[in-house]
Image (cartoon, helix red, strand yellow):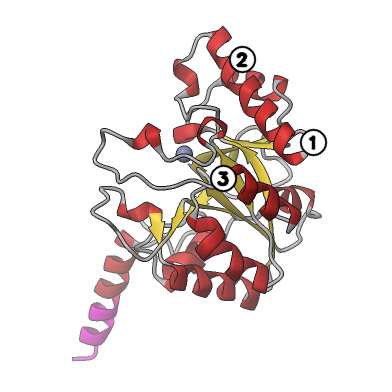
Amino acid sequence: MSWWPAALAGLGAAALSARFHWWRPRLAGAPVLMYHQIVKELDRTPLPKLRVPPRALERQLAALERRGYRVSGLSGALAAAPGAKAAALTFDDAFQDFADNAWPLIKARGMGATVFVVTGQIGGSNVWDQGKGIPSVPLLSAEEIAELAAQGVEFGGHGHAHRDLTSLSPQELADDLGACQEVLTGLLGAPARSFAYPYGLFNDEVKQAVARAGFHAACATRPGLLTGRTDPLAIPRVIVKRSDTAWDFALKLTRSKSRW
Ligand SMILES: [Zn+2]
């Protein structure tokens, strides 16, 4: 019967549409990609989605290049002309594996990246994750940050103690952000311009305090693309997950999300 293949194709398309965002219209704007760790191993972490293997990152960088994106840190995407095909790479928490596994791949392609540092734990570990079953992971040292900055990596703040900034009193908020900017300024020789909210949590008070601490741009974790109309203190991002296929990644570049 001639209707049968068409019905099957229709069912298949419905199943794919229920799961993936391919049918959604493309969004205008630059993807600001959010990564955390770049490692192959999972080490029993309960948050496997935040660990992207180096080979996956390499394929994603190649896909960006193939698609004609100009890939930089956050400042490049913010400065890109409207309509330019720009993308930014961002790495939260400043894990040591950025230096070992991510930066060599990024640098080899002439791309850039922004790394958001928890300034109270430089050379330490992700103590804020402890007690949640998340393994202890080393963070970049002051020497490594200075060396990477000299090679062109942009560094921004991620709080001094990785606390939920919306839970702090006005004084605690000013103290945390002031310490964060002070440490970064000392390390980089100039104030850091960008910030990423710990846990993606912020409100109007937090935004104002981040601006008062001298940060000009701040990243959230809400999915979306960066356009000329984006609030620079609430920049949406594209969350890259360990489970993303090449198709997920391609969908995310133009739709910010790939699946329901
Ligand atoms: Zn974080």
Of pointers 3 and 1, the one earlier in the residue sequence: 3
Mark 3 vs mark 2: give the one in front. 3
Disc on res. 190: 1
Q: Marks 3/2: CA distance?
A: 25 Å
Residue under label 3, please give it: 141
The residue lying toward the viewer, choosing from 140 and 53, is 140
- Magenta residues span 1-9
Amino acid under label 1?
Ala
Horizontal side, residue 132 vs residue 226: left or right = left
Q: Marks 2/1: CA distance?
A: 19 Å
Magenta: main secondary structure equals helix
**Among the 4 quarters of the image, the one containing residue 228:** top right
Q: Residues within 10 Å of mark 2 (few under 14, many from 20)?
A: some
Residue furthest to the bottom: 1
* Residue at position x 23%, y 53% in the image: 44
Tag 3, which secondary structure?
loop
Is the residue 161 above or below the residue 195 in the image? above
Q: Residues within 10 Å of mark 1 (few under 14, many from 20)?
A: few
The answer to whether marks 3 and 2 mark residues whose Cβ atoms lie closer than 8 Å is: no
Amino acid under label 2?
Ala
Give the percent coordinates (x, y) of residue 72.
70, 58
Tag 2, which secondary structure?
helix
**Among the 4 quarters of the image, the one containing residue 130:** top left
The answer to whether marks 2 and 1 mark residues whose Cβ atoms lie closer than 8 Å is: no
Residue 68 included in the magenta stretch of the image:
no
Residue 4 included in the magenta stretch of the image:
yes
Give the percent coordinates (x, y) of residue 209.
64, 18
* Residue at position x 54%, y 22% in the image: 203
Give the percent coordinates (x, y) of residue 4.
20, 85
